[in-house]
């Protein structure tokens, strides 16, 4: 899929400077209210249907997660966690819809070496532009949420687009459209935060004192947010990272190493050249040749 | 290539066999291709270099395989030359007088065997970095990870992959810096390149830069027969 909104680009992978950003679109967000989710997987089906994707039929491993993981053709999936809450003695069924979080500071985009293979629109959506993708897997290393998957078929990276094609024409993402309990809602990020605050207040009034919004600041906030009953322990929800951030290894690799390395190489070449300019070539003299002849004759 | 510093055809000394030269140039070629394709994927400003390999996808595909060629090529060089690169006491003296080295005052330096201390450092530096580059490169070679897991049971965590790619980048910069020293020295010291092109150097070159090696060669030659 080509870039649908090239005027709306905010960031472009492996590109110096800022794209034109001629238009400022509304910053959007999807809000996933885990306390309302019934685990019906309608979102998964809607995603497959809208994006016309069908993962290979796998095996049942005795748990609800199906397919068992994200894949190049599974861009969202429900992850089920059963939890015995030690404080209340309740059995909790924590169901998290996993998929791209559309970070404001996307690690995938930072790591990507191919110009324009990953873009971020001014509405916050992070999109993979397959025709520019070279299949190196750097985005996988950049992502703090373990989202992108490389296809074995065409060696391109795939993940949720937040239905950028639908959003571009004023529609909500397919998953949101299909959700029967309105556990998924979509709108401006501002509105979604306000909506989440209402939900958090409601959860708190019902005894979930640690309820809260998951909009991790370590990645500049996300354009997919969660309402969690246990916002103090996001890792309970099938390993949702507690304080996600781009790995310092990736920051170093794509930050200092990249520039210092190139400058260092440039300086080495420069000093070599200047050494030649100052000292001139190191030549063998006539005396050296004569001494060698003498040595050879003497050695006979 | 070489200079015309001496009117008559000077006496020559064999420095590299045909096998060693072929081995060297296979290694050199793969190293240069790796540096170019690697830099293309390392810095966005150099991404245009992927065009030399037929685009980004081909670059990504071919780079690791060239790495395998480099590893095999360098292993050959290592087996040929490691013994001659063992560190000696005089190498410390040579290094201590780096100023004379850079000024070209070789009369102030101890007599060198086949390799001087600088060449030995290039040799051992490259040996170490190529091993590091290969191991870290395998860690970043995603398309072969399924194969590695099935065949050898080797798998990598995401943090290991992140570390691998950082180490790979830093080691590659180190290797490129060493390569610059290596190439510059060969160009600066006139009469050196022919050693790897034609296999021989002039007697004067050997006398000036590797006198102990020349003495050994002459002595060995004298024992055999008249020689050439």
Image (cartoon, coloured by chain):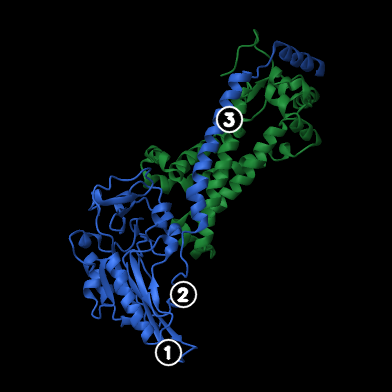
Chain colours: A blue, B green
In the image, B5 versus A35, the foreground residue is: A35
Contact? badges 3 and 2 (CB < 8 Å): no
Residue placed at 57% from the left, 53% from the top? B135
Q: Tell me the residue that label 3 is attached to.
A: B183
**CA neighbours of label 3 inside 10 A, class few (<14), some (14 to 19), many (20+):** few
Residue A91's label in the rendered image is 1
Question: How far apart are labels 3 and 2 at the CA level?
Answer: 53 Å
- State which mark lies toward you, 3 or 2: 2
Q: Is residue A78 visible?
A: yes
Q: Tell me the residue that label 2 is attached to.
A: A235
Q: Is residue A98 visible?
A: no
Where, by quadrant of the figure, is residue A267 drawn?
top right
**CA neighbours of label 1 inside 10 A, class few (<14), some (14 to 19), many (20+):** few
Question: How far apart are labels 2 and 1 at the CA level?
Answer: 17 Å
Q: Position of residue A27 (x, y in %)?
A: 28, 60
Per the image, label 2 sits on a secondary structure element best described as helix
In the displayed structure, B46 sits above or below B131; it is above
Quadrant location of the N terminus of chain A in the rendered image: bottom left
Q: Position of residue B64 (x, y in %)?
A: 48, 48
In the displayed structure, A101 sits above or below A254; it is below
Per the image, label 1 sits on a secondary structure element best described as strand
């Amino acid at each position: 899929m080509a870039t649908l909104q090239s005027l709306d680009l905010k960031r472009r992978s492996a590109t110096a400077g800022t794209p034109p950003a001629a238009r400022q679109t509304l910053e959007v967000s999807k809000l996933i209210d885990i306390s309302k989710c019934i685990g019906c997987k309608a979102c998964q089906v809607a995603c497959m249907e809208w994006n016309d994707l069908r993962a290979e039929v796998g095996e049942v491993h005795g748990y609800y997660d199906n397919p068992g993981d994200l894949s190049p053709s599974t861009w969202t999936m429900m992850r089920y966690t059963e939890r015995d809450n030690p404080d209340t003695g309740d059995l909790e069924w924590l169901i998290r819809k996993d998929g791209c979080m559309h970070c404001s500071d996307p690690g995938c985009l930072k790591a990507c070496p191919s110009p324009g293979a990953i873009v971020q629109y001014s509405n916050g959506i992070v999109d993979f532009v397959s025709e520019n993708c070279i299949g190196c897997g750097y985005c996988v290393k950049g992502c703090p949420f373990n989202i992108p998957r490389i296809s074995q078929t065409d060696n391109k990276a795939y993940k949720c687009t937040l239905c950028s094609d639908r959003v571009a024409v004023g529609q909500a993402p397919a998953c949101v459209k299909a959700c029967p309990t309105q556990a998924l809602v979509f709108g401006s990020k501002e509105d979604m935060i306000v909506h989440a605050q209402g939900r958090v207040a409601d959860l708190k009034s019902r005894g979930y004192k640690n309820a809260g919004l998951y909009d991790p600041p370590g990645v500049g906030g996300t354009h997919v947010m969660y309402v969690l009953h246990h916002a103090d322990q996001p890792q309970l929800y099938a390993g949702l990272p507690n304080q996600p951030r781009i790995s310092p290894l990736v920051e170093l690799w794509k930050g200092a190493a990249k520039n210092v390395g190139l400058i260092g190489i440039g300086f080495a070449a420069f000093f070599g050249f200047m050494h030649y300019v100052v000292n001139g070539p190191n030549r063998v003299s006539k005396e050296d040749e004569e001494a060698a002849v003498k040595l050879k004759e003497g050695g006979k | 290539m070489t200079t015309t510093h001496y009117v008559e055809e000077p006496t020559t000394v064999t420095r590299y066999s045909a096998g060693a030269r072929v081995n060297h140039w296979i290694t050199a070629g793969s190293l240069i291709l790796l540096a170019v394709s690697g830099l293309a994927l390392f810095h966005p400003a150099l991404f245009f270099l992927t065009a030399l390999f037929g685009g980004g996808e081909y670059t990504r595909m071919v780079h690791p395989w060239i790495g395998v060629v480099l590893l095999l090529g360098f292993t050959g060089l290592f087996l040929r030359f490691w013994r001659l690169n063992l560190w000696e006491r005089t190498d410390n003296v040579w290094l201590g007088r780096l100023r004379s080295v850079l000024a070209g005052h070789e009369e102030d330096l101890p007599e060198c065997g086949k390799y001087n201390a600088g060449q030995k450092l290039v040799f051992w530096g490259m040996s170490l970095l190529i091993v590091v580059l290969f191991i870290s490169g395998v860690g970043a070679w995603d398309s072969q990870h399924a194969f590695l897991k099935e065949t050898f049971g080797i798998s990598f965590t995401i943090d290991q992959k992140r570390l691998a790619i950082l180490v790979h980048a830093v080691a590659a910069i180190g290797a490129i810096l060493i390569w610059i020293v290596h190439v510059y020295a060969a160009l600066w010291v006139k009469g050196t390149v022919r050693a790897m092109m034609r296999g021989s150097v002039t007697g004067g070159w050997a006398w000036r830069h590797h006198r102990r090696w020349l003495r050994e060669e002459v002595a060995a030659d004298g024992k055999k027969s008249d020689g050439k």
